[in-house]
Amino acid sequence: MKIAVCVKAVPDTETKIAIAADKKNIDYTGVRFITSPYDEFAIEEALKQKEKHGGDTTVIALGGAECTDVLRDSLARGIDSAVHLNDADFANLDTLSTAKVLAAAIKDGGYDLVFCGHQGAGGDNSQVPSMLAELLGCAQTTMVLKLEVEGTTFKAEREIEGAHESVEGSLPAVISCQKGLNEPRYPGIKGVMAARRKEIAVKDATALGVKGTVGAANVKVRIKEMMLPPDRPQGRKIEGDVDSQVKELVSLLHSEAHVL
Amino acid sequence: MSQGYLVFVEQRNGQLRKASVEALSEAKRRAQSGESVTAFLVGSGVKALAAEVAKYEPTSILVADGEQFASYSTEAFTAAAAEAVKKSDPRYVFAAHTAMAKDFIPRVAARLDAPCIADVMALQQEGSNLLPVRPMYSGKCWGVYEIDAPLSFITLRPNVFAVNQSSGSAGAVEDLTVAADKVSAKVVAVHASEGAKVELSEAAIIVAGGRGIKGPENWPVLQSLCDALGAALGASRAVVDAGWIDHQFQVGQTGKTVSPQLYFACGISGAIQHLAGMSSSKVIVAINKDPDAPIFKFANYGIVGDVLEIVPKLTTEVRKLHEHN
């Protein structure tokens, strides 16, 4: 079985976000990049499916220099090989352009399964897996909590509002992973050492055959301005004994805030 | 030239989703004179629902009614939506940002080579152009987006856009014929989750618990307050990771981002990832025994104390208020 995993390098979720001077991006000064949290479930699922069915696993990341450590982290966990999609044209791509670049890297690889996190932390778009499946012309299931692969078919459970859906489909398929699917393993020392020696294949727009079809001239969505959310109003602590605190709170929620 | 709006109106078990009605209402408010608002229903035996949709006064309603839509499949719904776009030629396609729309709307966008902007919480208007505003980094910052395309897809965050109160009637209801397409994956069963009485992302009031509830045996204490308020139960990442409750209840980064009218943070200290997921709530109440917990900086009202002592009294007080009104 051939398995691809798409990962994204994102600012650590502990990061306090500041806006850059041009207001078109966040200020990356001092920001530490990590594997997007949902992508950890995708990496783990690729490893588990390989353990079960054999085959090989490839991790793919799109972006600049921040991707190298993230790709090495996947290799350290046990992914077989890594591909870095890196080109000046790939800066600030919209979701559809991102999917186009990934599809170009995946389409001729003969992959049975493509795993993604269901959403990249940061952009929070939740679009690339579905777009990728369309561009590859294959099945998709998103927000997956359970997966069983048997021959050329799969059974998955996905999360919807207040319920789970059971999905059945045929491979190849793009699967976007939700927390709960598995428990991601951490890389061991041996894995980290081995990952350092592995080569990361780098592909640019020309090698992928997307030169001129993605890039600044083809982006259809741009950020005009970024801002921090407005400050929350100054709150107040309610004093007194518990009975009077509770009475006052309910009265304030009712008569002052008008939310009860 | 493309003009007006197409709104995907989601139904589940013959009920319109409230979030879809919000999206339809917003399209009506945005449409300028002469611009049409077409509502679009997909399912099996859903034609009767057109009368329900008509109350929100779309210009017309397209209905894709057929066996192939009886249970959800990404590909069948994508084919139907692509056909609806072809038929109505809109400039903007709206949908509620739900699990279903998140799954298939980006696929439709890719098929039509059009951009998609997800989880939009406000719309600015510049002439006839919409500039969607959406949270990024789980709400730590916001982005205002510019779109450069004749057709674009926008999914709207539930619970943010108001529902139009109207009882008018729409123009024509028209059948949409969708050519059968390859379906390589489909839903074969739906299982209701245990416990979740009110859906978190659409709830007007949320009562969320963290480490301060001391153990999973104390969820009934919060659930009683939920019942008194008609609220949804939520949880911090710490207690989800500790195995006290299922992940579907988690609020914050790697969980759900919510914008209720009222949010009770009970025994939640307020890690940056949690704050990101709930800080756009209109009113926040924090109950925590640590007076220095970061959550108090975000709360409109705070009580320093033991959740397990305060919440039962709060439940009683809320019940009293409801009895008197």
Image (cartoon, rainbow, N blue to C red):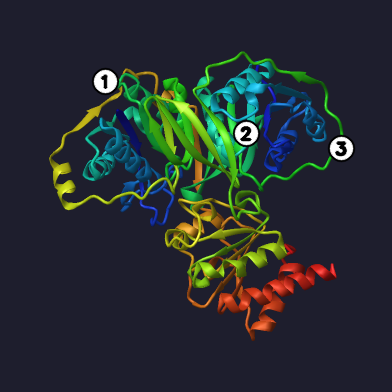
Q: Which mark is residue B130?
A: 2
| Inter-mark Cα distance, 2 to 3 | 27 Å
Q: Which mark is residue B58?
A: none
The residue carrying mark 3 is B167
Q: Nearer the viewer, residue B137 or B35?
A: B137
Residue closest to the far front? A150
Mark 1, Cα crowd under 10 Å, few <14 / some 14-19 / many 20+, is few
Q: Amino acid at mark 1?
A: Ala
Residue at left offset 36%, top offset 29%: A113
Give the SS element for disc 3: loop
- Vertical position of residue A242 compared to residue B90: above or below: below
Q: Do discs 1 and 2 belong to a common subunit?
A: no
| Inter-mark Cα distance, 3 to 1 | 58 Å
The residue carrying mark 1 is A207
Q: Amino acid at mark 3?
A: Ser
Residue B44 locus on image (x, y percent)? 70, 26
Mark 2, Cα crowd under 10 Å, few <14 / some 14-19 / many 20+, is some
Q: Amino acid at mark 2?
A: Leu
- Please, which chain is the residue tagged with disc 1 on? A
Residue B51 locus on image (x, y percent)? 82, 31
Apparent side of residue B98 relative to residue B13 in the rendered image (left or right): left
Residue at left offset 36%, top offset 52%: A12
Q: Do discs 3 and 1 belong to a common subunit?
A: no
Q: Do discs 2 and 3 belong to a common subunit?
A: yes
Residue at left offset 40%, top offset 45%: A38
- Vertical position of residue A201 compared to residue B260: above or below: above
Give the SS element for disc 1: helix
* Mark 2 or 3, nearer chain start: 2
Apparent side of residue A52 relative to residue B146 in the rendered image (left or right): left
Classify the position of the N terminus of chain A by image quarter: top left
